[in-house]
Image: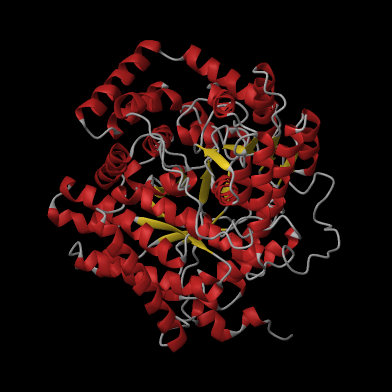
Amino acid sequence: MSQTQNDRPDAQTAAKDKPWLIRTYAGHSTAAASNALYRSNLAKGQTGLSVAFDLPTQTGYDSDHILSRGEVGKVGVPVCHLGDMRTLFDQIPLEQMNTSMTINATAPWLLSLYIAVAEEQGADISGLQGTVQNDLIKEYLSRGTYICPPAPSLKMIADVAEYCYQHVPKWNPMNVCSYHLQEAGATPEQELAFALATAQAVLDELKPRVPAEDFPALVGRISFFVNAGIRFVTEMCKMRAFVDLWDEICLTRYGVEDAKHRRFRYGVQVNSLGLTEQQPENNVYRILIEMLAVTLSKKARARAVQLPAWNEALGLPRPWDQQWSMRMQQILAYETDLLEYGDLFDGNPVVDAKVEALKAGARAELATLDSMGGAVASIEYMKSRLVESNSDRLNRIEAGETIVVGVNKWTTTESSPLQTADGGIMTVDPAVEAEQINRLSAWRAARDQGAVASALEALREAAKRGDNIMSASIAAARVGVTTGEWAEEMRKTYGTYRGPTGVSPSVSNKTEGLDELREAVNAVSDQLGRRLKFVVGKPGLDGHSNGAEQIAVRARDCGMDITYDGIRLTPDELVATARQDGAHVVGLSILSGSHLPLVEDTLTRLRDAGLENIPVVVGGIIPDEDAKKLIAMGVARVYTPKNFELNSIMKDIVGLAKSNASV
């Protein structure tokens, strides 16, 4: 009988590297449903967990808060208290697990709940392994789940790092997250520089907290979470540039002599931004190619990989879709011979030249940030640069200079057999929210109210004194304090924050090809008796603002008078703005799946305010059936990622304003 390729003696005897951690970013509906998904994925060969939390949990609201309406369980799992966390990890021994939690503003709290559950399981918490993302600077720039201003947020990041250094030494207390920077439009050089500047800000905050001899070990626990896009060679070289620059910063800026503490340790999720709604089956190949950028080079190989599913541009992936993405990782790690060899690119002149060019560009950008006072002082500058870069990227796609298969070239297609009767995605039952609220009410009623009050008072006093809040947070977790109650104490002590939008009111110098649209805007403005007013808003807790920003920028450059006040607005606030500013058209952007309740609420409030004649347009990741429901509610236009031609959207807005003017 002949030997298969996997049975060859040389393959059996070669020393292999260990595979990276194989994760799937997952969580939805309820803690119980998410627990079942986790246990199923672990049984299928997943080697680590990656928890997605819903937006109320990420932004520090309980499921029954007014801002949580329509958002519960949509983009992740709701975790309001110890009971939810206990259910989430039922029958999963945390002492044996490596868990990544994508959580930022409420990272101290969710880690506290995790530690409390591990204690209940009888685990030695000093042996816990995993990561909290805990990068607030990128939240101000790209993702929007921040709560407090930058300075106290940086202090809380340091609280987590200091606590973990002392009590949970194998835990990564922060993922410096460049993933969402690329999603927001960052060039490779910007992604390198902005992430490294964030890491420097955190280390500068941490350095005075520990003895000098212990600081290198603390540096060694800082990890990164990186994006890998479709430009394979550039992305692989970017990872190698990250390795070199981090080593350089740790050695020269912080004097870390031990090379093991200077290692660039990173996890990765490949680029969800590049997934297309059109011909979504093509996304399988995009995901695979992007994974190669972070696995082929041994020098810059990811420590953990999580892949999106082929249908994430359409909505929430089903378990089978997630399994398919996991199988990609397993085939590369276990069937191929990749892990038997050293680095495949060392000494390659093309790679070396590209890496050096990326490092030079990143160093120049870092120097600019340093001259402005570092990452925290440069938030507004970095945000404006990301909006500008993203605008350039979209312009190239719209002009056909950047080819996206199935989007702006080769658009003729057969229907996909993967999109079955369920629409090719999983949907969250609207009843989930009411059930979660009922469980939350029961939890509050059953706990020791005196113990809760004492724990909150201790937490409040620790925060006011400037103490590390972790011990008080863990004590609060044990007695049943909720996510919203913990976050409210942080808001009271440190205040809340509204980040810069990156959208200047001034017209840019990139108005080529907009002459016809600008004339149309001028004409309808004359008909209206004043400049066409377009109010762009993001109701709910969704902080992914790229689409809203680009719509606002293009509308501004077309000559419209725009209002865009950023993320996390209530329908009431948006209606008040529409009335106050005299809106001719209102645009709503919602990517979290909560479009139906939030749009319905906004339309109702517009009618109650006597503003029912203002046309409303809606953009987001919206299934076709939901789009029909929105139109039936009275929405004038619905846009999804397939509507990438911004000028066509601008023509619609002009037309809607013109029609309304003639009524």
Q: Which residue shows up at 27% across the image and 70% down it?
A: 248
The percent coordinates of residue 280 (x first, y second) are 73, 58
Q: Is residue 330 above or below residue 27?
A: below
- Front residue of 567/423: it is 567
Side (left or right) of 356 relative to 630: left
- In the rendered view, how is the structure colored? secondary structure
Report whether residue 317 is seen.
Answer: no
Q: Is residue 290 above or below residue 567?
A: below
Q: Which residue shows up at 30% across the image and 26% down it?
A: 493
Q: Is residue 507 above or below residue 411?
A: above
Report whether residue 554 is seen.
Answer: yes
Of the 4 image quadrants, the one containing the C terminus is top right
**Residue farthest to the left, as pictured:** 212
The percent coordinates of residue 558 (x first, y second) are 60, 51
Residue 441 quadrant: top right
Side (left or right) of 224 relative to 283: left
The percent coordinates of residue 340 (x first, y second) are 50, 79
Residue 605 quadrant: top right
The percent coordinates of residue 619 (x first, y second) are 67, 43
Residue 232 quadrant: bottom right
Label tally:
0
Q: Which residue shows up at 61% across the image and 84% down it?
A: 8
Of the 4 image quadrants, the one containing the N terminus is bottom right
Side (left or right) of 573 relative to 632: left
- Front residue of 325/572: it is 572
